Amino acid sequence: MPSIKDSPTELRHLRYFLAVAAAGNYHRAAEALHVSQPTLSHQIKQLEGQMGTPLFDRLSRTVRLTAAGEILHTRAVTIMRELDDARREIAELQTMESGQLRVGIVSTVNVAVVPEAVSAFRNRYPKVTVSVREMPMESLEAEVLAGKLDLGISFISTKNHPHLDTEPLFVEQLVAVLPDKHPLDRQRKILLSEMLAQPLVLLSHGFCTRELVVESVALQQLDHRLHPAVEMNSIEGVLSTIRQTNMVTLLPESAVQWDKHPDLRVRRLADKPADLSYRRVGLIWVNGGHRTAAARAFAEEVRGGLVNGKKR
Amino acid sequence: MPSIKDSPTELRHLRYFLAVAAAGNYHRAAEALHVSQPTLSHQIKQLEGQMGTPLFDRLSRTVRLTAAGEILHTRAVTIMRELDDARREIAELQTMESGQLRVGIVSTVNVAVVPEAVSAFRNRYPKVTVSVREMPMESLEAEVLAGKLDLGISFISTKNHPHLDTEPLFVEQLVAVLPDKHPLDRQRKILLSEMLAQPLVLLSHGFCTRELVVESVALQQLDHRLHPAVEMNSIEGVLSTIRQTNMVTLLPESAVQWDKHPDLRVRRLADKPADLSYRRVGLIWVNGGHRTAAARAFAEEVRGGLVNGKKR
DNA sequence: GTCTTTGATTGATGGCATCTATCGAAACGA
DNA sequence: TCGTTTCGATAGATGCCATCAATCAAAGAC
């Protein structure tokens, strides 16, 4: 099969064309381009063939653009500038002199880890636009997969989507929260079963932290059914209620900035770790995908905000 | 010398890149491009190397643009459109669906030849902008040479600029112009010397038609010195003066639309042609230059307006 | 006139885009 | 769970074509 090759226009043609137009002279243009003059002649002739008309008037001592040449010249200049711009823009993306970072998180990590990381990241890379969106774990996975998020911080487990790479950050486990001078606080150890025997204030169903409590109970196969005395749909509400009613609650450790509540007592449960439900919180990346420089830097900030897998 | 080749970006890379982005799949893109899939892989990898970052995320069943890929994509689309536009614009120039025609003329040809040609040209190619500038012969030559005019209509002689190609159109020679019932009109023949014996109305010095008269006198080596009775600086003025004073004048034949002046008598001089100065009027092109389609078409109109080298 | 400078032409060469063939991974279907 | 299919990546061979050196022809410059 005699392949009909008509050698399409290449950027090389335009580069040579622009050089000749600038030099007004094949020899000097060839010199500037570090190619031989016959090469230039050949390529320009080829370009003229592709355009269907001469681009230069070969006068005795100089060459000059024809009308068609003028048209191509303005276009070629634009084309070269576009390509340069693309290169510069991409380079800026890598050095994070521009670009955006889109992070999706589940609400519990928004208390300390993420705000700190965002702050540090913004200080270091002020030109990068940061978007942090709090959302349910499922949407988060979907958006990371769809490329709408550069990075996710979510719960990770063995049954995460196979196209997602995960990296554990810390373990989120239940702590007992007691008002000051509560009787349980006098014990050296507090067990989950002891907490469940108390009148409890819990978050409403649907909150993922509430589900964590449910799972913990199920894990211990306690015959207690979970009977919260009060249900509320905000963490702050739960905490205020505890203060004023002398009741207690169970919350994930990282869901609250405890130092803002010095009047409350926070105690780890003394059950064996295996007996406690907990969730690993971690980074979520697309499996084969390119990790944005900004996303990588942000992940580093998040890791840096944690020591030995615990906050601070 | 081991030449350090870093294979610059070519349009081929962008074409392949766009095809992959559009297809979301190397194999289908390769099919659409009529190249093999390994070729695509190789070229895209090369482009990614040039950009310094991956452009596609290779996911399991599909490929997707990275952030850098998105940036390059918008630029590449622009680049391809620019090139297409250039091609289309140049094609329009050739088919005269656009463009401009810049003609320079000496004033004598502006009477009949040029207006007719302009009219015919505009009817045939209404999309082409026509610019006709009347100017002295010297400026005209300079501007044609400088590429500021596509075509000139001027006097031509052996001593025209060596970088100008000329094509004779017609010969402009002196005619005697007499008012009705002037005594000279009764003669079968009128000689230049007889005209010079009359009281003459002539154009002022500086008009090229006046110089033609001077040259004619010099050519015949008549000892007459040229003593015009009246000098005027407009042809219409000369003609009006003749009507009212019964004087006569000498003018180039093609400088006046004689049918607009039925009351005047126009007589060729009966001298041997060699004795008469005359000017060949013709087209002037730049020597090695590209002749614009519009200019060629206009030249054809001019030629068509003349028969046997005479008007009409 | 001679010498220089211009772009065009010619024929040879090697770099690189392209091919075929193959691999390995992953998704899908039974 | 095991083929089967569908991805993209890789390896080695091939041939087109950009490139070069050498040369030519024309036209200024002196």
Image (tube, coloured by chain):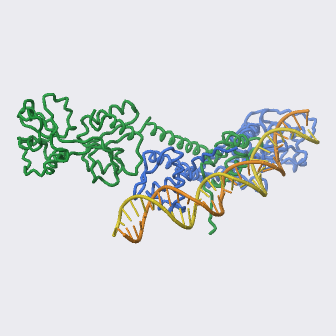
Chain colours: A blue, B green, C orange, D yellow
Left or right of B192, for residue A278: right
Observer-nearest residue: D13 or A170? D13
Q: Residue at x 90, y 38 (%)?
A: A218
Residue A147 quadrant? top right
Where residue B12 appears, as percent x and y from the top left, is 62, 48
Left or right of A64, for residue B197: left
Q: Residue at x 37, y 30 (%)?
A: B123
Where residue A165 appears, as percent x and y from the top left, is 78, 47
Position of the C terminus of chain B, as image quadrant, is top left
Residue A204 quadrant? top right
Position of the N terminus of chain B, as image quadrant, is bottom right
Instruction: Give the vertical position of B147 relative to A27 (above or below).
Output: above
Q: Residue at x 75, y 40 (%)?
A: A141
Left or right of A119, for residue B261: left
- Residue A292 visible? The answer is no
Q: How many marks?
A: 0
Residue extending furthest toward the top: B262
Where residue C6 appears, as percent x and y from the top left, is 44, 60
Where residue B302 appears, as percent x and y from the top left, is 33, 37
Residue B266 quadrant? top left
Observer-nearest residue: A19 or A298? A19
Observer-nearest residue: A265 or A73? A73
Observer-nearest residue: D4 or A186? D4
Q: Residue at x 74, y 33 (%)?
A: A233
- Residue B96 visible? The answer is yes
